[in-house]
Image: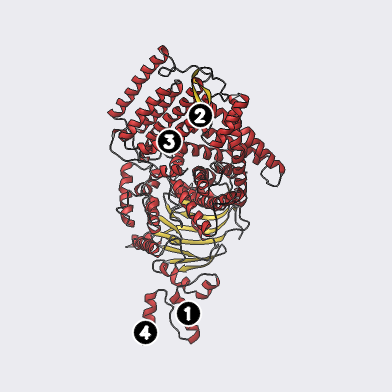
Amino acid sequence: MSVGVSLLKKTTIEAETFVQRLDGRVKFLYFLWATIIVYIFFDPLLNLIFLAVTMALAVYAKCWKPIALTILIIVVPWILFAVPILALPLGFPWNKTIIGYINILGKDYPVYLEGLGWGVTWPLRIAVAISTALLFFLTTNQAKLVATMFKMKFPFKLIYMVIATFQFIPLLASEANTIMQAQIARGLRTDVGFVQKIKNYLAVVIPLTLSALNKVQIRAIALESRGFSAPVKKTLLYEASFTKLDYAFLMTMLLVTVFLAWVYVYIGFSPLAHLPWIWSG
Amino acid sequence: MDMVWVKNMEPIIKVENLTYAYPTSKDFVLKNISFTVNKGEVLAVIGPNGAGKSTLLKALNGLVPHFYGGKYGGRVVVSGFEVLNTPISKMSTKVGFVFQDPEDQISGLALTVWEEVAFGLMMLGYPREEIDKRVREAIDYVGLTGLEKRSPFELSGGQMQRLAIATVLALRPEVIVMDEPTAQLDPLGKYEVLSVIEKLAESGSTIVLAEHEIEEVVYFADKMLLLDKGEAVAYGDTRKVVTMVEELKRRGVDPPSVTELTSLLKEKTGVDVALPVTLEEAVKIYSELLR
Amino acid sequence: MSQEIREVSPTGKAIIAVVLIPTIAALNYVGGVIVEALKAPIWGDTWATILGTFIGGFWVGAAGGFLYNIIMALTVWGLPSWVWGFANVAIAAIAWFMMKMGWTDLKKPMTWIMMIVLYGLVYPAFTTAISIGIFGGGPLWKPLAAAVYTATLSSTGNFFLANYVQNAFTEIIDKPISFIISVIIAQRIPKRFVLAK
């Protein structure tokens, strides 16, 4: 989870590339579009292509490191676990096609296509989703994020809640840190047994919660005192509008969609890897 | 000249027999409180902890009773609006409230100092040009020029509190209410904020503040209200209230050191001398005496 | 002097909810960070959902939990994981149900039984549906859980069962502990902070 906290600290990578200049809605659509496509197709090679394109954009936008890190932490171990467990004869019910044999400790074991395909394709689908989502997030600064939500007609209170969460997390995290340091100074140790670890957790979380709830009270009356509930249309200081760049990007996505639709109809749902059909492939 | 006189004597705040209990409190927290504040006056509310100072202040902008609910009696009229019949969002255009905790009153929506100062104006739907103008004025007034693009949470305590004041000033309220604004600040922060408050007082703003730093407040408070256990124990000119040394001490409030010192010396030596309320006055009085 | 005292109904609850929900989401997030720092063997990132339900009712807990998942989806896990937001809603629903039925007293054995049944057996069925439908239903990338998955898969050949048992194994410890933690915290909270009935 500390990957998460550090990611939050580095939320936006400010650079002057076209990726940053793309409207937030376009980047969000890119994420949705890419994810849906890789879910419609069942093809690990197609997934890799999408992943490569996204990473290329990320490298150009100078935000590839957090994305690569996340993929390394989540997707790679996943594949490493999934492939052996599913491709070897360990019970994956749809294993039929043997594509080879692997020698483990002197005995030959069959490797099945179905399990292998499953073990590789699903994590890669997630990798595409993660990379496109992070690309959106890392290249859209928070002001643009708010503008995006506003243009998408999100209700104001919802916009508040999303932005506020981002602002509260570092505040609460630093308070949690203070409390932890204080408890350590009072003798809290982490090399202890299960029950004590839970007690340690409580020793930090209880004061943190009480403090957080107190803040809620104060913040709520402060908001009210500054007109939060006024039944008028709020003026938000952020603007979002499409440029030629956005239209070009959207057009590209549209063309690719048409092409892929043709591929799906005439070649099939697994055009490059030719994986066989499994009930929910 | 007559017009000026009339304007100054208009009570902009009228509190009549205010009585209030929170939904969860057994007793009444405010009992039969009455006072007025004229335009351009500064009223300091003093009293021990739990006396009801915060509650009284919140009754001026509608948080009491609307936000909390509860039992409410009496009348509070601010800028012509009766608080009981006016929603908080409307009161917020007339009364600006600065809270004690510098960080907790920051909205959470604004990403920069500029946006935070604009917060109230955004909530009330002001047009963009008006917002730009007022935010600029407010930021410069409190001395935060140059910090516009910072995150509001990166400021020091004194800066954050000045930010809160700026947020309130941008709305151009007729009354500014402050609930112990320097209580959670370090000495530098206290100094920064008190300077802004003094500046506001000198330029004719109407201010009601609850403050523990009595020594500082006497410099610019016109009137004082001493509260204890929800009742108004003393009310009147600052000098009159702050020199009631016995009464203050009995209620758990420390008078200014020079006032207390002089009062004790008076008792001990029997010398008849006026009680000073500020350091400067004390120096004057004592240099006369010691001649 | 007699005077008319009126009863005024409060308007503050809606605003408190608006501030409470992001706080719940943030607490869930920070809970996960604390777990890592203290090396506690639980996920620890849904306890605030349960607590939020105790304080503010089902909608507050569910919204806070869901918002947490959206933020995590945006920052760490990738956006498809927003669907776990529904799992958080289920957590809130179970917490609300247990609150209504009075099963929050840790001295009552019924509390412990229902806690394990609802969070350890019923809830994993929910997460299994999500695992399989959205994520393919393969083994998790944690060694112990993956071992359980493998064992079930090879002994029964049932794909769905393997997923369910893996999930139940993971949740049966984490969720009840989160529940207990939230109950303990809720007991320490002054009454005036509680919105739910």
Query: Alpha carbon of mark 1 to alpha carbon of mark 4: how far?
Result: 17 Å
Q: Mark 4–mark 3 contact, CB under 8 Å?
A: no
Query: Alpha carbon of mark 2 to alpha carbon of mark 1: how far?
Result: 85 Å
Crowding near pointer 3: few (<14 within 10 Å), some, many (20+)?
Answer: few
Mark in the foreground, 2 or 1: 2
Disc on the earlier residue, 3 or 2? 3
Which residue is situated farthest in the front direction here? A106
**Quick one: A27 or C195, which is closer to the camera?**
A27
- Label drawn at residue A281: none
- Residue B121, position as x, y percentages in the image: 38, 46
Q: Which residue is mark 2?
A: A82
User: Residues at marks 1 and 3, common chain?
Assistant: no
Q: Identify the residue shown where x is 38% and y is 54%.
A: B155
Q: Amino acid at mark 4?
A: Glu
- Residue C151, position as x, y percentages in the image: 60, 30
Q: Which residue is mark 3?
A: A72
Query: Alpha carbon of mark 1 to alpha carbon of mark 3: how far?
Result: 75 Å
SS at mark 3?
helix
User: Residues at marks 1 and 4, common chain?
Assistant: yes
SS at mark 1?
helix
Q: Amino acid at mark 3?
A: Leu
**Quick one: C66 or A94, which is closer to the camera?**
A94
Q: Which residue is mark 1?
A: B263
Disc on the earlier residue, 1 or 4? 1
User: Residues at marks 3 and 2, common chain?
Assistant: yes
Q: Mark 1–mark 3 contact, CB under 8 Å?
A: no
